[in-house]
Image: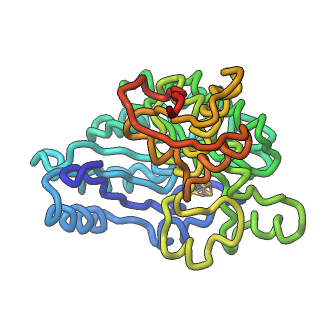
Amino acid sequence: MTPRNRIVPVFVPHLGCPNACVFCSQRTISGSLCPARAEDVVRALEEARGKTAHAELAFYGGSFTAVGEETQRALLEAAAPYRESGFLTSLRVSTRPDAVTEEKLGLLRSYGVETVELGAQSMEDRVLRLSGRGHTSADTAAAAALVKASGMKLILQMMTGLPGADKGSDLRTAEALCALRPDGVRVYPTVILRGTALEALWRAGKYRAHTVSDAVETCAPIAALFQRAGIPILRLGLNPTEALSGGEAVGGAYHPALGELVYGRLWLERAREKLRAMGPLPRRVRLLVPVDCVSRMTGRKRANLLALRWEFGLEEVSVAGGQIPPETVEIREIL
Ligand code: SF4
């Protein structure tokens, strides 16, 4: 997102949502449980117009197409003049897989919506059932196919560490999402939010929290998989907010820099693999990585370099940026 093309989020909380996912607390994520109205859209866009030349409007909240048609039309119509004037460069909505039909997508298209985000969360039906999602993996596959056929962009969201999930099932979910050929994905490791059914399960000992370290372990190979498949990861981990940092996240994988931790792990694994394959190692090595990946290779507080030094018995490990292919590490001896 550039400052000239910012995303204006409008939350459509719980409207039309037919069930209650165990992890969901829309109040914490969106800060509101009031239904969004046309005037909220206008207010958000007017505010953005004072700050930026162009913007994208995103209806978040997870169940846009499950909302009554009249409300959908009112919200989309409120945005129409901003689209016609060229201020809005795109519109996106997020919704549930079981609330997608050809007709509903047709309505979105007629208002110029370009991107549909589907909350897949898991492609394992047992996990979906235990999480109270109320839809199946087949619903997600069918909805994804409809979005692709409509010509709109498809973004898929998944969660790791849901009830009944483990590292293997989360990786299988990522593989299943790759097969649906989305234009991007968002990965959200499960956070236990105050007041949710998940909190009650956790406090009763019926759910083991997905810790930050579990999330890093689980998401590093998932991130590698999406990168290999050429699928952009648009978000990894919940956006940090004051409410979450201030105590609404009572457990689970909440960390304001979770994405950086995951990418740091990914680069650590790449360097490990390279060093293991090298045979006798020089005492002092330099890791050469693409210029924009130096800090991820280094890790927070140089954690990756310290880990490699210790694991491989090296005297010195440093990192430098170079003109090398993306997602690769080359090892050089420090002379
Ligand atoms: S579908 Fe689940 S996550 Fe989405 S709004 Fe409804 S309860 Fe919350």
Q: Is 41 or 119 nearer to us in this picture?
A: 119
In the image: residue 9, left or right of residue 87: right
Q: Which residue does the image show at 71% across and 30% down from the upper left? A: 172
Q: Residue at x 37, y 33 (%)?
A: 106
Q: Is residue 96 above or below residue 49?
A: above
Residue farthest to the right, as pictured: 205
Picture residue at 60% right of the left edge, 33% below the top? 271
Name the outermost residue toward the left: 85
Residue 184 spot, x, y in % from top left? 46, 34
Q: Looking at the image, which is closer to me, 66 or 202? A: 202
- Name the residue furthest bottom: 246
Coordinates of residue 243 in the picture (x, y in percent): 53, 75
**In front of the other: 105 or 89:** 89
Note whether residue 246 is visible: yes
Q: Is residue 50 left or right of residue 283?
A: left
**Residue 20 appears in view:** no
Location of residue 302 in the rendering, given as x and y in whole percent from the top left corner: 56, 53
Instruction: Tell me which corner region of the image, top left, top right, bottom left or bottom right, holds residue 252.
Output: bottom right
**Apparent side of residue 300 relative to residue 21 in the rendered image (left or right):** left
Q: Is residue 329 above or below residue 302?
A: above
| Quadrant position of residue 180 | top right
Q: Quadrant of ligand 1?
A: bottom right
Total marks shown come to: 0
Measuring from the top left, give residue 150's x and y in whole percent: 39, 25
Question: Which colour assignment does the render follow?
Answer: rainbow
The front one of 299 and 2 is 299
Please report the residue visible at 44 percent of the width from the left and 24 percent of the height from the top: 148
